[in-house]
Image (cartoon, rainbow, N blue to C red):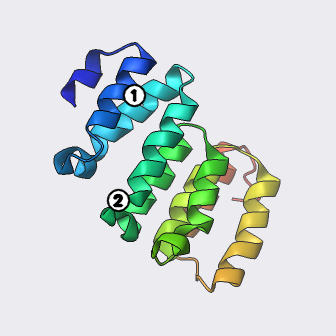
Amino acid sequence: MAVTITMRDPDKLFEVSKENAHNRLVIEDKYAFEDAVLRLAGRGGYDYIDHLLEHQKSLPQGRREGFVVRIIMLYGKAGMIEYAMNTFYGMHLFGCTRTVKSLNATLKALTQMCNLAVICLFLEEVPWKLGIRLDVVSVNIVISTFCDMGILDKG
């Protein structure tokens, strides 16, 4: 998938990415998919991104939390926060357990919105409802985000 580095046309980029969607080397190469997703996002190819990442969830690797965390992070980097959230909430549907690791990935994606109300609501409801305990990484994500937002007293 190294050819994606020079591609500018989102249709061609999508086709190359789709053709390699079953290639184990590409599936496990987080940089190849990240590059493709960021290029598609930069050209408004959000439907393509959704198609590629939804397909990735259907693979056997989709049952591994680390693999799903990568999908959540890619949705976040593409600015597709709702898709990242839906992936987190739906992890159990494809046999994947949610832990603080996937919660932190979703939290990180959420922080890109810089919406204090949404971040606080997520932190108040989700860990309690799902029985996931926040960790040091969770707290650091929140503190860093509040500081970046200029809300130093919250940080």
Which quarter of the rendering shows the N terminus?
top left
| Separation (CA) of disc 1 from disc 2 | 18 Å
Q: Can residue 131 be seen here? A: yes
**Picture disc at residue 75:** none
Residue under circle 2?
Answer: 59
Q: Nearer the viewer, residue 84 or 112?
A: 84
Q: Which mark is residue 14?
A: 1
Direction from residue 37 to residue 59 in the image, left or right: left
**Which residue is painted at 77% across and 63% down in the image?**
120
Pointer 1 local density, CA inside 10 Å: few below 14, some 14–19, many at least 20 = many
**Residue at 53% from the left image edge and 41% from the top image edge:** 50
Residue 103: where, in percent of width, then height?
Answer: 56, 68
| Secondary structure of residue under mark 2 | loop
Q: Amino acid at mark 2?
A: Leu
Quadrant in which the C terminus is drawn: bottom right
Name the foreground residue: 67 vs 56: 56
The residue lying furthest to the left in this view is 25
Count how many numbered circles sit on residues in the image: 2
Find residue 87 and report its horizontal and vertical position in percent.
Answer: 56, 59
Where 152 falls versus 125 (above or below)? above
Which percent across, then down, holds residue 14?
39, 28
For badge 1, the amino acid type reads: Phe
Q: Residues within 10 Å of mark 2 (few under 14, many from 20)?
A: few
